[in-house]
Amino acid sequence: MKVISVQLCCIVFLSLTIVRAQPKKYSIHTVAFYNFENLFDTTDDVNTNDDEWTPKGAQHWTIEKYEQKLKNLSTVLSEIGMPDNSNAPVLIGGAEIENRAVLEDLIKQPKLLPFDYGIIHFDSPDKRGIDVALLYQTKYFKPTVYSNIPLRIYHNKVTLKEEEPQQDDDIEIKMADNHRVFTRDQLLITGFLEGEELHIIVNHWPSRSGGEKASSIFREAAGNLNRRIIDSLQKINPSAKVITMGDLNDSPTNKSVKTVLGAKAKKSEVGEFGVFNPFAAMLDKGLGTIAFRDSWDIFDQIIITESLLKADFSTFNFWKAGIFNKSFLVQRSGQYKGYPLRHSLTEVGFSDHFPVYIYLIREVK
């Protein structure tokens, strides 16, 4: 009897050990950002500067080229995050979008249609008529509140106007001649990802037109506005999970990102209410999302609040990040060999940027 009892105890112990050793299962979602690079339709809009992107314009932008552009973009978007995640991104931030209609055409593409994407988009005051937007899989993400928050900046002034209390989240840079630089709004969305509240900010910060140094004040103003939006969300809920993403037209090491927004390169450096930039380490490794004069940089970034860095995966938290730079997105020959394969007069490419992405994971009980 004793022998049987010992054997039974061993069997029970081994069974429990095997059960405990079973690998944990996780729900995984990809969150992506992509600069679509001049996603224009072929119609001349009198309210925007889109003449170049018409059949008679400089780009000879025909319906055939437009349809190929949509096909190319849909191929990219459907594959971001693979092979770690077989599902397309649940959230996609986009930039350089002419209007809502082009997004409606995009999500109807055969490679995206099965994912049933919804659209959040506002027209911005950008002088070229390009906007930011968010695509979301309606099965997983339920938006509740969203708004476009304007960045009001004025040429040649180097100080922020902060003397009077702000009535909204605008940041203003003023000058005597009151010459406004029209740029993209920052798109703020709050919603629930499989029941968990999440805040997303989609950005396309002011360009480097006129030179990096001369234009840096404008991107610093954008970083200031971004930081204030995050602060306001954290004031309402100290545990707010915020993802800010976009083409920032600056590197992770530039003042607008590193100092004004306060994005840290290492998780260990992120304090309470702080933000983490996983793309800073990639830049150190020589990786990039955009190339210029044979030099790589990372303008496209996804930055997250400290609340998404918890080791406890009972709720959705950050796992890892990446740059989607598959070979079919790369120029294979010519002067720009190795660069992102962008549009030219002889070829409808993808974009002059590579997309970026992060994974959010949650343990499945």
Image: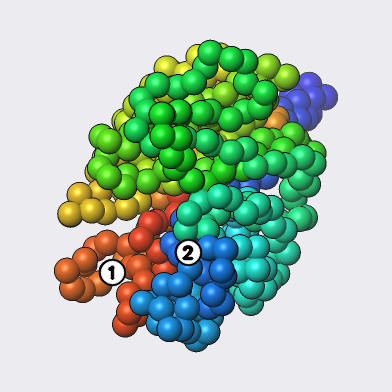
| Quadrant of res 316 | top right
For the point 75% across and 35% down, the residue is 196
Determine whether 179 is above or below 118 in the image.
above
Q: From the viewer's side, name the closer residue of 356 and 156.
A: 156
Front tag of 2 and 1: 2
Determine whether 100 is above or below 275 in the image.
below
Q: From the viewer's side, name the closer residue of 82 and 133.
A: 133
SS state under label 1: loop
Image location (x, y in percent) of residue 253: 31, 30
Quadrant of image for the C terminus: top right
- The residue where tag 1 is placed is 331
Q: Is residue 285 left or right of residue 69?
A: left
The color scheme shown is rainbow
| Quadrant of res 210 | top left
Q: Is residue 287 left or right of residue 105?
A: left
For the point 25% across and 72% down, the residue is 332
Q: From the viewer's side, name the closer residue of 112 and 100.
A: 100
The type of residue carrying mark 2 is: Asn
Image location (x, y in percent) of residue 279: 39, 38
Q: Is residue 216 left or right of residue 85?
A: left
For the point 62% across and 15% down, the residue is 165
The type of residue carrying mark 1 is: Gln
Q: Sequence-wise, which precedes: disc 2 or disc 1?
A: 2
Image location (x, y in percent) of residue 250: 35, 39
- The residue where tag 2 is placed is 49
Determine whether 266 is above or below 318 in the image.
above
Q: Is residue 29 something that shows in the picture?
A: yes
